[in-house]
Image: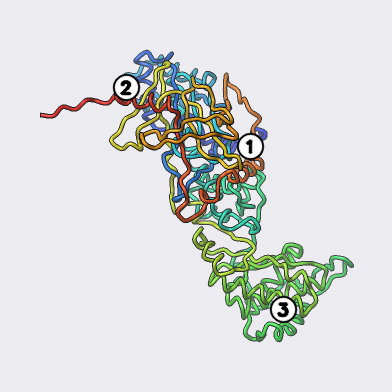
Amino acid sequence: MNDREISCNSGGQFMDRGRMNQNGVVQPLLTDLYQITMAYAYWKSGKTDDQAVFDLFFRNNPFHGEFTIFAGLEECLKFLDSFHYSQSDIEYLRQTLPEGIENEFFEYLGNLTAHDVTLYAIDEGTVAFPRVPIIKLEGPLIIVQLLETTLLTLVNYASLMATNAARYRMVAGKHVKLLEFGLRRAQGPDGGLSASKYSYTGGFDGTSNVLAGKLFNIPVKGTHAHAYITSFSSVGELKTRLLKHKQTGVMEDLLEHAIRHRQLLSHVLDVSTEESSEGELAAMVSYAIAFPDGFMALVDTYDVKRSGLFNFSAVALALNDLGYHALGIRIDSGDLAYLSCLAREAFEKVAEHFKVPWFNKLTIVASNDINEDTILSLNEQGHKIDCFGIGTHLVTCQRQPALGCVYKLVEINGQARIKLSQDVEKVTMPGNKNAYRLYSADGHALIDLLQKDSEMPPAVGQKVLCRHPFQESKRAYVIPSHVESLYKIYWKAGKICQLLPTLEQVREKVQISLKTLRNDHKRTLNPTPYKVAVSDNLYNFIHDLWLQNAPIGELS
């Protein structure tokens, strides 16, 4: 490891561990203090050999939708793999925890690993639903308690971000490209990197974040800022005007070609050369010389119709004279539906007049504080946008900034545990459980079913009673055409037990999993709730345990 990598590690950046880039910030002390104080209290109470089961789940789908994409599992496994309190961690805890804690406890912490933990999870990239645990952990009480906060922070934002991205993908449609442009607006550098990774997981096509591209092999895309355009005021500022012809290799004056085409375009696009910005023309010529095969220009610095499109078309035609094809334009302000239609119409006119059919296929990119509702509105207006660059609303998840995953004890030493609440939504489903997804004959998911781990799995073609966990009258018989067991063992005896998918494979999994849902579950407005049920056996078990633990009131 070189000096730069060492300094990055100490600064909390990503450490290169082969394929699995380990974020140096993710370590045992990335937790809430009460996890460690509870660990001491457990230790003091002699609970070091107690075995526990915890469920990690969420109570509500985000963004007023009816599905969530599970993400962050690989990061959880990396955390388990590296879980160990360093000597400096122990020294810090000695100084930070209250006085009177025995040295033996610190020695105990120093020897802790996740070797004896078993982690069950649904596959990363799978659609998930409220109350169905997405991760289930079994192991010594103290260690599985200590894992809580870190696992939640690794899953909460990752799943929220992937879900947000998947929703953008659905409203944009499969033929429109989506690029994540949110690094500058993200919640810090780690938030920016996570946003890039999980937006790609959810269905985006690329990112502007160069480090995310390096770390996660995500396609990196970008154009230039308005600053590049405004840095030029006249063509006299051009230091070089020459570009080598792609086929002949002869150096030619690109500006000369562009000025000649501006004269011709003036009649085609009904724009006067005096109206357009000479500085903008100079900037575009300069950028085209730098990137002749990748010329994508920002056209809204001054006026899209009377300057930006006009100058872009002139430079693109000049590049065409030298054997190059421009890529397209970006619009970052104004009426995006109108301007995209205007741009497409202009390109079609140029294509026909100058006999350059590829002009019809120039890409129109739109950015400008775009959110899900913006895209829906643009769809209704018949926009001609080929690609959206989305930043703030995507990476900050402005419609809902947190998913709200929780981590609850459901069993200790083989005895089920339940948390009661006057708010029924917060009552936990006790015991070690298995989860199954039941499918109809047409291949769509019908219902998720939770059962006690001692029950036989539901069988294809056999009627199974599915009950609402808390409403007695809500029940239905289901005859599944296909049954999917949702959990796999991902970590056991100190090792990862499954071949982990690549980011590309997780990304594909998201789209495959979404296709198993009916369209009414996925629609933006008033989606149909997806049903989550418990078996009759588990239903009775929950309510018996509830009655056993609920205090009996007394009236006087």
**Quadrant of the rendering where the C terminus is positioned:** top left
Q: Quadrant of residue 35?
A: top left
Marks 3 and 2: in contact by CB < 8 Å?
no
Question: Quarter of the image holding residue 285?
Answer: bottom right
Q: Helix, strand, or loop for circle 1?
A: helix
Q: Amino acid at mark 2?
A: Glu
Mark earlier in primary sequence (1, 2):
1
Please provide percent x and percent y for residue 113: 52, 21
- Where is mark 3, residue-wise? 349
Q: Residues within 10 Å of mark 3 (few under 14, many from 20)?
A: some
Mark 3 / mark 1, whichever is N-terminal: 1
Is residue 20 or residue 5 the one in the foreground? 20
> Which dot marks residue 152?
none
- For marks 2 and 3, give the CA distance: 80 Å
Which of marks 3 and 2 precedes in the sequence? 2
Residue drawn at (41%, 35%), measured in percent from left and top?
468
User: Can you give x and y, in whole percent of width and height, for residue 413 in the image?
Assistant: 42, 16
Q: Is residue 82 in sight in this rendering?
A: no
Q: CA distance from mark 3 to mark 1?
A: 56 Å
Residue 423, above or below 414 = below
Q: Position of residue 294 (x, y in %)?
A: 73, 62
- What kind of residue is marked 3? Lys
Any part of residue 546 in sight: yes
Q: Nearer the viewer, mark 1 or mark 2?
A: 2
Q: Amino acid at mark 1?
A: Asp
Q: Is residue 410 left or right of residue 357?
A: left
Q: Which label sits on residue 99?
A: 2
| Labels 2, 3: front one | 3
Specify the farthest residue to the right.
248
Taking the spot 64% from the left edge, 41% from the top edge, the residue there is 503
Is 373 on the left or on the right of 483, as rendered?
Answer: left
Residue at numbered disc 1 = 3
